[in-house]
Image (cartoon, rainbow, N blue to C red):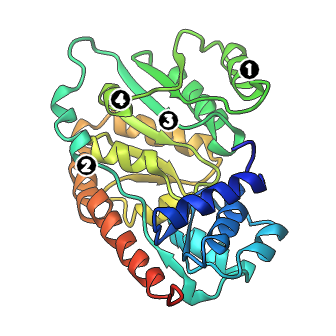
Amino acid sequence: MRNSLNVRSALKLARFARENQIEIIHAHVARDYPLAALVAKRAGGVPLVLTRHVLFPLKKIHRLTLRSVARIIAVSQAVADGLLAQGIFSEDKIVLIHNGIVIDRFAGVRTARRQGGSRLQVGTIGHLAPIKGQEDFIRAAAVVCAQRDDVDFIIAGEDKSRTGEHRRSLEMLIDDLGLEHRIQMVGWINDIAKLLPTFDLFVSPSRSEPFGLAIIEAMAAGVPVISTESEGAREIIESEKSCRLVPIGDVEALAKAICELLDDPREREKLSGNARQVVSERFSLERMTDETEQVYRQAASLAPSI
């Protein structure tokens, strides 16, 4: 496709859907929603399912093009509430299905934690952007480094901006604080399951988060988690038995939580075990796919009779 509004591509996709007797069309990204709606209509009224992964409001074009959506899946209650508030979809069309992960992918990583050396490692994972709070993470690291010299920090994630300004800004802050030997920026990581075992703590410093997939992955890997009280984190973390929560943007509170957990190996182990149980009970891929299949069946029942 040349772009998400390419009518020629839509016609080709509609023909593909008809020829292959496609029964459900499912789109995940807002820029593709209007194209998917056109394809569904041109294919003879194939039911359209959407998944909404973010908190940003939909645009006017979506209000015009998505009236016939069969179901829209929200990955968190915060996302569902935002969709309902916009008034584009009726409440009966919005379905909450939390993201799930392949838990077995992270099984056993606790026993594979790095061996040797006395230095501790605190990490965060997420694309580089102000909303992800990496600046707060760096400033909290400065507070921790002023108190102890046995901790290093890792920032993993890609700068998706066109000019790379987010990474440059973070690198400048690291240099200004004199932390170039204590904080490492490792960029995009293909296999998070291999990185997580190197962390003694995982931190999610986000200022806003629709769900928090990296939090779930860290919990599944048995890495103790500290997170800001973002929308997604509050939904994942029902109590502080499995993770630690701190106010958004509170650098001092974040630094204090990091120091307290680094000083308490037993508490880290307790959080680790409780977190793994939460993930197993609530965030498995099997649960997500079962619930998505139910949505497909509901949508399929709305298909026009031929």
Between the residue at mark 2 and the residue at mark 1, the CA separation in whole angstroms equals 35 Å
- Residue in view at x 45 percent, y 81 percent: 300
| Residue 86 horizontal/vertical position (percent) | 74, 78
- Residue in view at x 19 percent, y 41 percent: 107
Give residue 187's quadrant in the image: top right
| Residue 296 horizontal/vertical position (percent) | 42, 75
Q: Earlier in the sequence, mark 3 or mark 2?
A: 2
* Image depth: mark 2 or mark 4 in front: 2
* Image depth: mark 3 or mark 2 in front: 2
For disc 3, the marked residue is 125
For disc 2, the marked residue is 103
Q: Earlier in the sequence, mark 2 or mark 4?
A: 2
Q: Nearer the viewer, residue 93 or 125?
A: 93
Q: Name the amino acid type tagged 4.
A: Phe
| Residue 201 horizontal/vertical position (percent) | 37, 35
Q: Secondary structure at mark 3?
A: strand
Q: Any mark on residue 168, and which? A: 1
Between the residue at mark 2 and the residue at mark 4, the CA separation in whole angstroms equals 18 Å
